[in-house]
Image (cartoon, rainbow, N blue to C red):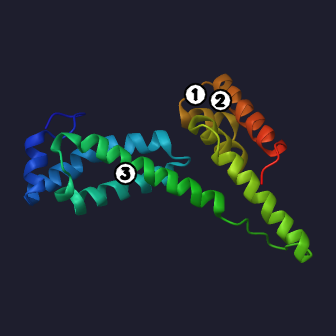
Amino acid sequence: MPEGRWPDEAVVLAAQSGDAASISALVSGSHPHVQRFARSLCATPEDAEDAAQEAVIILYRKIGTLRASRALASWMFRIVRNECIRRSRLMLRRPEVSVDPPAQSAEEDVLHRLEVERVAAAIAALPVDQRRVLVLRDVQGRSGREVADTLGLSTAAMKSRLHRARTAVHAYLEEPHD
């Protein structure tokens, strides 16, 4: 199989029939494409690697269920996209761990949780490109240069997206939501 290309239809068909060598070729031939796509979607390199691995595992387990052998790439990309979205949602739900939490009343605790949920909803409503910049910079605390490098952007483009994302989150939080 030529480097940089998806496995051809004959390999996919043989893998669907259960041929072990074809399944191995399919998994190894698809992984670089899946990994590259995951890096473009997921917020962190770790999540990208996990999403790519999950997609390859699903490919290995469920290749027999693929209806159209020519649809391999779109099937794999859909799996990766869904996995990256799932991981982003999990990241937004992770509670902050504090070494010495301040004593709060039950009312303050409920109000804090409601505010966290509103911020998470505002971030989730952002377009993907803005959400990734905001999560990397403001949630994970990475430097501007690191965020720009991770996303393959110039510093100016990263700052512009970050500004738009922050403005959109602020506007969302200012709107009354039931």
Identify the residue at image location x=67%, y=30%. Answer: 161
Label 2 crowding class (10 Å Cα cut-off): few <14, some 14-19, many 20+? many
At label 3, the amino acid type is: Ile
Mark 2 or mark 3: name the one nearer the start of the chain.
3
Identify the residue at image location x=32%, y=40%. Answer: 33
- The quadrant where residue 132 appears: top right
For the residues labelled 1 and 3, say whether their Cβ atoms are less than 8 Å apart.
no
Q: CA distance from mark 1 to mark 3?
A: 25 Å
For the residues labelled 2 and 3, say whether their Cβ atoms are less than 8 Å apart.
no
Residue farthest front in this picture: 178
Identify the residue at image location x=43%, y=47%. Answer: 81
Q: CA distance from mark 1 to mark 2?
A: 6 Å
At label 1, the amino acid type is: Leu
Camera sees residue 141: no
Counting from the top left corner in percent of width and height, residue 62 is at 23, 60
- The quadrant where residue 174 appears: top right
Left or right, 97 with respect to 8, comes to: right
Mark 1 or mark 2: name the one nearer the start of the chain.
1
- Disc 3, SS: helix
- Disc 2, SS: helix
Quadrant, the C terminus: bottom right
In the picture shown, does residue 111 fall above or below 101? above
Q: Please give the residue where the numbered disc 2 appears in the rendered image.
A: 158
Counting from the top left corner in percent of width and height, residue 51 is at 42, 54
Counting from the top left corner in percent of width and height, residue 1 is at 13, 38
Q: Please give the residue where the numbered disc 3 appears in the rendered image.
A: 79
For the residues labelled 1 and 2, say whether their Cβ atoms are less than 8 Å apart.
yes
Left or right, 143 with respect to 153, comes to: right
At label 2, the amino acid type is: Met
Which label is found at residue 109? none
Mark 1 or mark 3: name the one nearer the start of the chain.
3
